[in-house]
Amino acid sequence: MDYASKKPEKHICIGILAHVDAGKTTLAEGILYHSGSIRKLGRVDHGDAFLDTYALERSRGITIFSKQAEVTFGNLGITLLDTPGHVDFSAEMERTLQVLDYAILVISGADGVQGHVQTLWQLLKRYQIPVFLFINKMDQEGTDRQALLDELHGRLSECCVDFGGDAAEAAGRAETASGAEDTFMENVAMCDEGLLEAFLEHGAIEEREIGAAIAERKIFPCYFGSALKMQGIEALLAGIEKYVQAPVYGKDFGARVYKISRDAQGNRLTHMKITGGALKVKMLLDNGEKPDQIRIYSGAGYEMVNEAEAGMICAATGLVKTKAGEGIGIEGRGAAPMLEPVLTYEIELPEGTNVHDMFLKLKQLEEEEPQLQIVWNSELGAIYAKVMGEIQIEILKSLIAERFHVDVNFGTGNIVYKETIETTVEGVGHYEPLRHYAEVHLILEPGEPGSGLRFESRCSEDALDRNWQRLILTHLAEKSHRGVLTGAEITDMKISLAGGRAHTKHTEGGDFRQATYRAVRHGLKQARSVLLEPIYEYCLEIPSDKVGRAMTDIQKMQGSFSTPKVEGDRAVITGTAPVVNMREYASEVVGYTKGMGRLTCTPGGYTPCHNAEEVIAAAGYDSEADLENPTGSVFCAHGAGINVPWDKVTEYMHLESFLKSAQVSQEKTDFSEAAGRWETGGNSGGGMVSSGLAEDKELEKIFERTYGPVKRREWHRTEVRETEERRPAKKTEESYLLVDGYNIIFSWDELRSLSEVNITSARNALMDILCNYQGFKKDTLILVFDAYKVEGNPGQVFKYHNIYVVYTKEAETADQYIEKTVHRMNRKYEVTVATSDALEQVIILGQGAQRLSAQGLKEDVEQTCREIRQILEERRENDRNYLLNALPEDVAELVEDVRLGRKKFS
C-alpha cells in the first residue's frame, strides 16, 4: 500500500484472535485475498501462508509471533494483526490487544466455544475492545448454526447477534425479506435500551446507531462461514466496513509499544501504535532517543515512510531503550498482563559454553518476549527462564539454535511462587557508609489479588526534593523484589514513599538505590507474609459417566469446580486448581476417558498456597543469608559504616516513624471528634455540657492521661475489634451441622465405591452413619442432597430418625441451599458446614460459619464410633452379675480367703 499516493477515508487497527486450529490464519489469508492485497491464497498446511513469515511457523503450522498486514477494503483502511492462538504464546497475543481498535474472534464451528476462547473473551472485556465474531468451519458435517448461536449466548454473551443470517439470506426473496429484516432489527434492539426505544419509535435502527453500539461493546456481530472455502468472508468484510467507527486522536504525540523484534540483519525493531500526533524520523522522544527509520510492515515486506500518523502501526529502528508494553509521550504505563508464566526452567548449556556471554544473548530474547524473565542465579551458577508450556520450550530451543548456534536443553520445570503481605507496615532503609548518605521510609500495604505492585509518593517536596523522590520510585520499579519466605517475587501490594532524607554533599543516586532496596526488605521482615501459588482455570470435557471420577480427582488436587454441564453423553466441568497438582492431569484424563476427554488449562492468577509450610520448608530460604538482598541497614558510627540488623534499625533511624505519626494523628482526631460529641450532647436536642472540655490544654491533658503510650493502629484502617463488639452474641447452646451429601459421598472411598454400584445405597449408608454420629454429638444435623436436575422438583425436607434430610428444588444446588441457610442462621447460632468444595469453604467462612472438610468429618465420625464402643464396653463391665456380689459379706470373705490360699475350706 502506497501511503503517499492513497489514503483511505477512515483507518482502523483490527486483530484476529482464536483458539489454536480454529482457522485464524486461514481467515487472514481470505481477507487479504478478498481485499486484493495478495493474488494467490496460501494455506497453513502447505506452509505458504502470507503472514506465517518465520520458518518455524511454517514447519509447525502454528502462529508464534504477531504479524501485520495492510489492507484496503472500499473506503476503509485496515491494519490487520494476526496473533498467536496457542495458549503457550498468549502473552504475545495479550500485548497486541493494547493497540487494537476492533477484534475478530474466530470460533471453530466444529468445536464450539472452547476453554481458551473464554479466556480470550475475558481479555477482550478487560481491554474493552469491540468484537466481531466469525464462526468458521461451517462446511463440516454436524455443525448447527442455531445451536452454535445458543452456545454463544450461554457461554459468551446474550448480545451475540447473527448479522449474516435470515436478513441476508432473504435479500433475494421479496416476500420474506421484510420479515427477516424485522427479526434482525428486533434482535439488535434487545441488546440496548436506547436501540429498543429507537426501534419502537421508528420501526428501524440506523446503521450509525448500530455501529456506535458495537463500538461500545453492546452488540457483538456474528458471521458464519468457511475460511478455507472462502465462504462468509465477504459478508464479514462488508459488515466491518459498514459498522466500524474510526477513533479520534489528539494532537499531542503518544505511542504504545507492543512488541520488540529483530529483522534479518539483526536491527532492533520497536513495534508501536501511534495514539496521538505523529512520529517522524529523527524526532526526539521523551526517553532521549530518535528513530532512524519508520517502517510499515505487511507480511515479511515493508515500506519506509518519513512520518507515521495517529492510528497507524509501525516499526522504528534505532531505539534501544524501549520495552514491550510501555507508553511513550502522552501514553502512560500499560496494564499488568493477566496471563503470566507459571513454570520456571533451568536452561542447560553444552559443555564449554561461556555462561556469561550466553546470558547476555538470552537477554535479547527477553526483550522480544518479556514474560521469559531470564534470570542468572549466582548461587547455583545457572540461568533460568519462565515459560508457559512445553510447546514454547520447543520453540525457544529452535530459536536459540537458529540465532545463537547453541543447542540447549531445559531442565525439569518448577512452580513460580510469589509472596505478598497481610498487614500494613513501615519499612526503613538507611545507607551511610563513609561519605555516603540516604534514608528511605516506605509504607507497604496489602493490595487486591491480581493487582501486582503499585508505587506512589506521599512525601512532601519540602521534606525531600522531587528528583530524589522520582529516583526512589524508579528504584522500586526497576527490580523484582524478593520475599522473605522462599525468596519468591513479591506482588499484590501498594508501596508508598512516606519520607526520606538526603545530604547536600554526600548523597549520590546509588545511595538511594541501596536505601530503597533495604527499606522494602525491612518492611517485609516486619509484615505477616503470605505465600501465593499459581492456579489454572481449567475446562474439562469428558463423557458424562466419568463426572464422578473427575470431581473426585479435582477435589484431591485441592481444586474447585462449578456444577457440571451435561449435554447428552458429554459433560463440561470448569473451575480452578493449583498448577502444581494439575500439571500431569491432561494425560491422566486421556487415559481414564480412553481418549474421549479433553482438558484445557489457562493461567488463572495466584491464590494463597494450599501447602505453604511444606513449600517453605522445601525451599530452605534464609532471608538473613541472602547477601544480595540485605534486610538490615548501614549506619555510620565512629567514622565508619556499621551493619545494623533489621530488628534494630528503628533504634538507629534518623527520621521519625511516619506510620506511628499517622496513628497518633488518627488517635487525636478520633478523640477530638468524641470530645465534640460529648460537648454537644451527641444530638441536636442538646445534653450535658462539660465546660472543662472546652479548653484545648485541658483536652491535651485528658488525652495524655487517658491514652498514655500511643497504641499502634494500621495505616488508614479501623480497628476490627469495635465492629465485633457491636455484633449480637450468638446462642451457643444451639449448634447446627450442615453436610453436603454428594460431596461427602464422593470424598469417602467406601461410599464412592458403593455409589458406583448404587447411588441410593450410598445415600442411605451416609444417612445411617450420620444418625449414629448425631446421637452422640447432639448438634442439629442437616444433610443436603442436590436434586436441582430433577425437572419440576419442588424440593423436599423430612426427618430421618434424628437428622433432617433435604433434597433441593429444581435449579437449586446444595451449595446454594447451604449458603442461604448459613446466611440466615449464623447470626444467632454456631453453624458448621462439612464440605471439601474449596469455593464453598471460602464463602461460608466469609459468612462467619465454621468449616469442616470431608476428611475432617470422617475422622470425627470414626473417633465418635470409638468413643461409643468404649462407653458400651464399660457399661457391659459394670452390668455383669457376679456370684460373690450376691453373698453375705462374711461368707464372701471366707470364699475369697480359700481362693487365695489364706485358709483351707473344711
Image (cartoon, grey):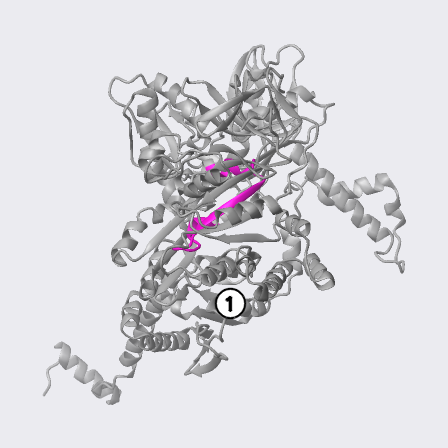
Residue 386 in sight: yes
The amino acid on which the numbered mark 1 sits, given as a three-letter code, is Gln
Tell which of 262 and 728 is nearer to you: 262
Task: Give x and y (percent) for residue 61.
Answer: 34, 38
**Which element carries disc 1, helix, strand or loop?**
helix
Task: Give x and y (percent) for residue 887.
Answer: 23, 89
Task: Give x and y (percent) for residue 169.
Answer: 52, 59
Side of 135 where 544 appears, left or right: left
Tell which of 892 and 879 is nearer to you: 879
Q: Is residue 892 magenta?
A: no
Side of 563 where 894 appears, left or right: left
**Image point 89% across, 60% down: which residue?**
685
> Badge 1: few (under 14), some or many (20 or more) residues near its Cα, within 10 Å?
some
**Image point 61% across, 38% down: which residue?**
75
**Image point 70% across, 57% down: which residue?**
194
Tell which of 415 and 623 is nearer to you: 415
Tell me where residue 762 sits by quadrant. Answer: bottom left
Tell which of 484 and 70 is nearer to you: 70
- The residue wearing badge 1 is 816
**Image point 37% across, 25% down: which residue?**
377
| Magenta extent | 93-118
Vertical position of residue 170 compared to residue 327: above or below:
below
Q: Is residue 115 magenta?
A: yes
Task: Give x and y (percent) for residue 611.
Answer: 39, 47
Residue 122 in sight: no
Q: How many marks?
A: 1
Which of the image's four quarters has the C terminus? bottom left
